[in-house]
Amino acid sequence: MNNIRELSKDESSGMTIIVKTISRLVLSFILLFGFYIILYGHITPGGGFAGGVILSISYVLLMLAFGSKVALAKLSNFWASMLDNLGALAFIVIGFLGLTGGYFMTNFIWHGHPGQLISAGIIPLCNIAIAIKVSAALYAIFIGLSIYGRIVTEEEK
Amino acid sequence: MNHILPLLVGIPLGMSVINLILSKASKRISDVIAPLAVLAVAVLSFYLLGTETTAYWMGGWYPPFGITLLYDGLTSLLLIVVNTVAFLAIFYSISYMEKYTSKPKFYSLFLLMLAGMNGVVITGDLFNMFVFLEIASIASYALVGFGVEHEELEASFKYLILGSFASTMILLGIALTYAMTGTVNMADAATMLQSIPASKTMAFAAGAFIMGFALKSGLVPFHAWLPDAHPSAPAPVSAMLSGVLIKAIGVYAMLRVIFNVLGPTAINLNIMVVLGALSMAVGGFLALGQNDMKRMLAYSSISQIGYIVMAFGLGTHLGFIAGLFHLFNHAAFKSLLFLSSGAIEHATGTKDLRRLGGLSGKLPVTTTTTIAGALSISGVPPFNGFFSKLLIIIACVSAGRWFLAALAATISVVTLIYFFKMMRFSLFGELPAKLQKIREVPFPMAFSLIALSVICLAVGIAYFVGPTFSELFLEPGANVLLDGLKNNAANYISSVLGG
Amino acid sequence: MGGTSSLYIMNMALMGMGIYALIAKRHIIKKIIGVVIMEYAINLFLILLGYKTDGIAPIQDSSINAAQLAVRAVDPLPQALVLTSIVIGLGTLALMAAQAIKLYEKYKTFDMSEINRLRG
């Protein structure tokens, strides 16, 4: 797809130019905030789930404002479900790696100092895995529901 | 410390994800890896048989702070039942599920459901049990609606609404238990509850728990979803739902919570007896009038679950043995019957008894296995159902409950009648003209059917011949329940907290 | 305790509202909303169990010792439980929404009393 600035002038798909312009400005900040929530999940409120929801919201916003074609060109249905599976797999693999520390899900990495960014062992890694899983899954659910809904309403017409 | 316990959940959970990734490359792969994963879990659960009671601390966090997994006699029986039936059902679905699109998704949901059930069985933590219970339930809602046709969707939606209500009730029970004890570890909660006097809050919590689990296991008067959901699902899923799901997340969870956490007070046990007897009678009589083969089997499941719950509610050692034995047997013959009905549907395209008949000449394997299942469930010696029903009746008599014994005997006659009806209308009689060209089912389906029939016969003979079967499978489970009944679950608590 | 107990009563009222919507309403979407309200009432109940007036976050650092923390900090466990329960609720909700769409596609109605092919 082309530059997002050009897309916002294209009136054939998506919402009005006002919505498109605002979303274009806000999108990157939402994405950034999502990453912040994920990476600081182990020392501040938040974490993988909350951050993942925020990440998926940025894609949902893209889809609502610019239409499904633009959003699907950025992250297709296939890759959404692939990332969904890979995130879940990463979490399970982290759990099994914990067996090296003696138990399933053991926190086997160096714990670091409390309150610093690099600390808490596997918890940030788990947060990242969960975030990938949740963001991709929510986006895939949104794609699924919106496409199904459209098929149903088009059949009625 | 036994590292196999987390694998019982980890393997199906991991493989369900890996299956989805690999199936994007080739759809044939999932036909291999999904049954292999279930086979691995089944082998592990047999390997664990006979090991002593062990607790496993997830992540090395000792109880009551971390999540504890526990392996004891009751767990061992349930693991074997769940995973054996799961393997045969998934092997069967290799050819049965051909007619559905997106078979890999079916395998993944199936593995998720299995992971949830194994999790419910091995966990020692109330909230963790709720989470696994929801994993199993959500996967089963989706599996019931897998055909996405009118009936499937309707049944699935009803099941979903009532299932969510049940889950909410269970969560309410857990929240109230947490409010009273300040812990969600089962053993720790049991210790705390024994040290505080009985309160109205805990009575309410017990009511919420029993209502939730009764809804999940389809006991009358909470059975409305079951006769819709179980017949609408694809046959292997029906076999899993009726054969093991309602036991693992309904009966087993109810037993754990009542016997190990809340304490088996007279009221709790009597509620179990009443619910069981009611389900037994109502389910049996409603099954008589059905013309849809799978619907009849679903009502029969309600009736047989009633037998099981009633036997546990008697609160005697013999009752526990009888209940566990019938639970084991019901898993074998009900999944066999559902798989057989699926085979008949696969061959003929219908499950309506009025349009079937005379299949014995055309489908020799399916006919044999259907007869084996029907004879087992209606309690004809030497099949396994005879011994467990006999044990239940003897347990009722020795507990002094003559009425229940008479009721159980009557309902087993009713069971015999409706299974004769089923056999008469499907297997014998005249073959309709439309069904002249039907063929016997392919190898994977036939293999599962024969394996389950052999289990039905072999278990009956093994029980009759010597005490080995009972000592290996039933006694350890009954001892766990007896420990909860007589001993305030002292062994359970010490094996979790002291281990 | 007056404030807290009225909160519990309102919580029970919320739960009752969910059950009412679940039982009395025939519209599928309203039933779904009933289930969600009920789940959230339980979540709120769990959060209330851990609530303390003027409580602090359950993190120990140099400014507070363990005994003071135990008195003043809110209970962290219900929050973890509720987060999990919200995620489960999200999964159930997504499945319910998908089923509602599919049911509408097949039956052309959202009225549960007209969706009645299964009987007996």
Image (spheres, rainbow, N blue to C red):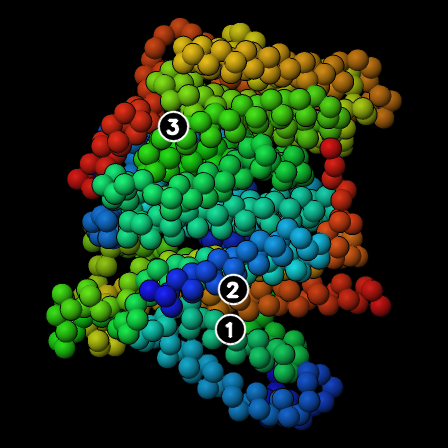
Image vertical order of residue C118 relative to residue C98, above or below: above
Mark toward the viewer: 3 or 2: 3
Q: Please provide percent x and percent y for residue B367.
A: 67, 17
Which residue is pictured at 47% across the width and 71% down the height? A53
Q: Are marks 2 and 1 on the same chain?
A: yes
Contact flag, marks 2 and 1 (Cβ < 8 Å):
yes
* Quadrant of the rendering where the C terminus of chain B is positioned: top left
Q: Position of residue A73 (x, y in %)?
A: 60, 76
Residue identified by numbered label 3: B266
Q: Secondary structure at mark 3?
A: helix
Q: Are marks 1 and 3 in contact (CB under 8 Å)?
A: no
**Type of residue at label 2?**
Ala
Relative height, residue B154 to residue B259 (above, below): below
Residue in the foreground of this view, choosing between B224 and B428: B224
Q: How many angstroms separate mark 1 from mark 3 (CA)?
A: 52 Å
What is the crowding at mark 3: few (fewer than 14 residues within 10 Å), some, or many (at least 20)? few
Earlier along the polypeptide chain: callout 2 or callout 1?
1
Between marks 2 and 1, how big is the CA–CA gap?
8 Å
Q: Where does label 2 land, which residue?
A: A137
Q: Chain of mark 1?
A: A
Would you say residue B386 is visible in this rendering? yes
Determine the chain carrying the residue at label 2. A
Give the spatial CA distance, label 3 vs label 2. 47 Å
For the residue pair B375 and A12, the one nearer the viewer reads as B375
Q: Does residue B80 appear in the picture of this structure?
A: no
Question: Considering the numbered disc 1 on the image, is that residue within a helix, a strand or a loop?
Answer: helix
Judging depth in this view, the residue of A122 and B33 nearest the camera is A122
Comparing labels 1 and 3, the label whose residue is closer to the camera:
3
Q: Which residue is mark 1?
A: A56
Q: Is residue B167 left or right of residue A76?
A: left
Instruction: Give the tally of numbered discs.
Output: 3
